[in-house]
Image (cartoon, rainbow, N blue to C red):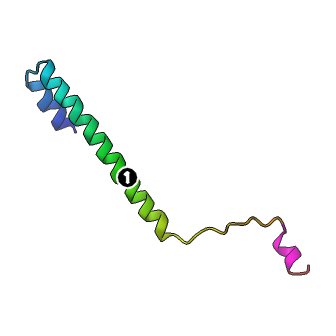
Amino acid sequence: MLLLITLLQDTATDFNDLGKLMLGGFAAAILIAVVLTVVRLKLRGKRPAAPSFISITSAEKDRGE
């Protein structure tokens, strides 16, 4: 990341180049968000499903104690 910033500072840019850089950064941000979302959804699918009910009774009560 530091290398990229250094390269960008060394080159002279006009407004057209800055627009292209902003568009590229926006596209990169969208791509990263999509990849992270897909990875998160795939990881969620591998975990066992949580029970769809909530029990309010205690474990001791169920055992008859």
Q: Magenta stretch: give its range.
A: 57-62
Q: Is residue 43 left or right of residue 22?
A: right
Question: Can you give x and y, in whole percent of width and height, for residue 8 in the image?
Answer: 14, 29
Residue 55 appears at what percent x and percent y? 78, 67
Which amino acid does the dot numbered 1 rest on?
Answer: Leu
**Above or below 38: residue 24:** above
- Using the image, determine if residue 2 lies above or below residue 11: below
Residue found at x 33% / y 53%: 35
Q: Residue at image x 23%, y 29%?
A: 22
Question: The N terminus appears in which quarter of the rendering?
Answer: top left
- Mark 1 — residue? 36
Q: Looking at the image, which residue sits at the far left?
A: 11
Question: Which image quarter: residue 2?
Answer: top left
The image position of residue 33, as x and y in percent, is: 36, 46
Q: In this orientation, which residue lies closer to the viewer: 13 or 5?
A: 13
The quadrant where residue 64 appears = bottom right
Q: Please say whether residue 8 is one of the residues in the magenta stretch.
A: no
Q: Between residues 7 and 18, which one lies in front from this camera angle?
A: 18
**Which secondary structure dominates the residues rendered in magenta?**
helix
Element on which disc 1 rests: helix
Label 1: how many residues lie within 10 Å, few (<14), some (14-19) or many (20+)?
Answer: few
Of the 4 image quadrants, the one containing the C terminus is: bottom right
**Residue found at x 13% / y 25%:** 17
